[in-house]
Amino acid sequence: MECAGVISAVGPAVKNASHWRARVAFAADAFASHVVVDATVVAPIPDEISSEAAATLPVAFFTAYYALVHLARLQAANRY
């Protein structure tokens, strides 16, 4: 479900998109040569991380989020 590559086109509603910059994203058809995804599931790849390494990052973060928020029910502290 995760992939890495470059943006080749964006829809008219997408603001501040950098064409041809390396990105990582979630995509149902991640093994395809081209995918279409919502801009909310796309993130830039830092220069020091390869595309191959970046493609492995989203699942690690979402696994941690799911474990902490949904399973452990982690919440902000009530400061009142």
Image: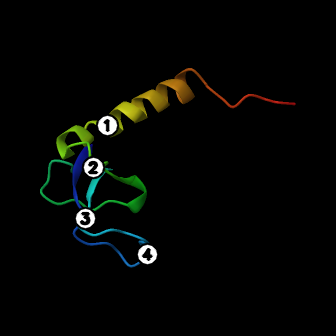
Q: Looking at the rendering, in which quadrant would you find the N terminus? A: top left
Looking at the rendered image, the disc whose residue lies closer to the viewer, 1 or 4, is: 1
Mark 3 → mark 1, Cα distance in angstroms: 18 Å
Q: Image check: 70 left or right of 61?
A: right
Q: Disc 2, disc 3: CB below 8 Å?
A: no
Q: Of the residues shown, which amino acid type is indicated by label 1?
A: Leu
Mark 1–mark 4 Cα distance, whole angstroms, equals 27 Å
Name the residue located 30 percent from the left edge and 50 percent from the top edge.
Answer: 45
Mark in front: 4 vs 2: 2
Spatial separation of the CA atoms under disc 2 and disc 3: 16 Å
Q: Nearer the viewer, residue 52 or 64?
A: 52
Q: Nearer the viewer, mark 2 or mark 3?
A: 2
Residue at image mark 3:
7
Residue 61 placement (x, y as % from top left) = 40, 34
Q: Which mark is residue 57?
A: 1
**Res 23 seen here:** yes
* Amino acid found under the numbered disc labelled 2: Asp
Q: Residue furthest top?
A: 72
What amino acid is at disc 3?
Ile
Report x, y in % for residue 12: 39, 79
Secondary structure under tag 3 reads loop
Find disc 4 in the rendering and name its residue.
13
Give 69 or 47, whichever is nearer the viewer: 47
Quarter of the figure with residue 16: bottom left
Report which quarter residue 7 is drawn in. bottom left
Binning the other alpha carbons within 10 Å of mark 1 as few (below 14), some (14 to 19) or many (20 upward) gives some
Task: State yes or no: discs 4 and 2 in contact (Cβ < 8 Å).
Answer: no
